[in-house]
Amino acid sequence: MARKKLIAGNWKMNGLLADGVELAKGVAAEVKKLGRVSTVEFLVCPPATLLTSVKKALKGARVALGAQDCHFNLKGAHTGDISPAMLTDVGCSYVILGHSERRADHGESNALINKKAVSAQAEGLKAVICIGETEAQRDAGKTLEVCREQILGSVPEGSTNKKTVIAYEPVWAIGTGKTPTAADVQEVHAEIRKVLSKKLGRAVANKIQILYGGSVKPTNAKEFLSLPDVDGALIGGASLKVEDFLGIATKVL
């Protein structure tokens, strides 16, 4: 069975209430116009402050709701954190974990990301686990080594395609306008699937969606999304404009 393409928008720390609702309504309206497309799934991940309002704005559209992070505990004395249970309570079905900005800004380790993923998966959330190398690591020829290490450390044992998505985002390409070549992306994605196969078994690895992220836009989306091991995109800046987000999606319809 062919893997569906997942077009996911990571809004990051962008959007006040009115802006977020307007953006969500715009995405919902355009997705509804597409009708029942069985080969593509849509996901938006707004800031936590907008989750409830965006959920309402998406009503009736085939667009899933995701969060940008969660704690590994379901409740307790963790000021400022949000638990997986709280996310499912407001209608989330996905959560992004281990994004390079979390790894860099908050010092998140593979072990911590793994712990969060275990908790999120147990609560019924699909964990979008992010990996990717820095420019220095790339220049040193360590791209595959870094990605292997992050996969092995961040992805929980027993993960399945129903609980897990992998997003490869080379750190040096995020928001910079720089992108790797299509051949480079395919090489990394194929290696990711190979490592997942060793960790989780070939049958599971062949079903897991592996997304590419890093300056994805309508003008380069088709090249990346047509690669055999690229199963969609995790989109940052371009997801903040309805026409760009849907413009990327239409490249796989």
Image: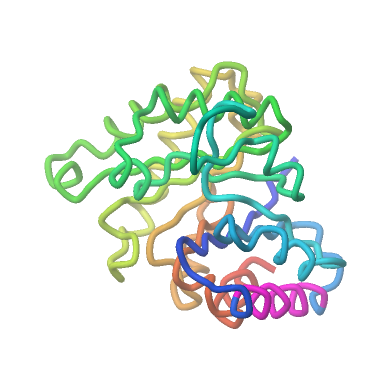
Q: Which residues are magenta?
A: 20-32
Residue 44, given in percent of the width and then of the height, sits at 63, 61
- Taking the spot 52% from the left edge, 68% from the top edge, the residue there is 222
Q: Is residue 217 above or below residue 116?
A: below
Residue 26, given in percent of the width and then of the height, sits at 70, 80
Q: Is residue 151 left or right of residue 234?
A: left
Magenta segment, prevailing SS (helix, strand or loop): helix
Quadrant (top left/top right/bottom left/bottom right) for the N terminus = top right
Q: Is residue 100 left or right of residue 24?
A: left
Q: Nearer the viewer, residue 118 or 214?
A: 118
Is residue 228 part of the magenta span, yes or no?
A: no
Q: Quadrant of residue 89?
A: top right
Residue 244, given in percent of the width and then of the height, sits at 54, 78
Q: Nearer the viewer, residue 18 or 225?
A: 18
Q: Is residue 19 above or below residue 77?
A: below
Q: Nearer the viewer, residue 114 or 247?
A: 114
Q: Is residue 85 left or right of residue 147?
A: right
- Taking the spot 42% from the left edge, 26% from the top edge, the residue there is 112
- Taking the spot 68% from the left edge, 72% from the top edge, the residue there is 24
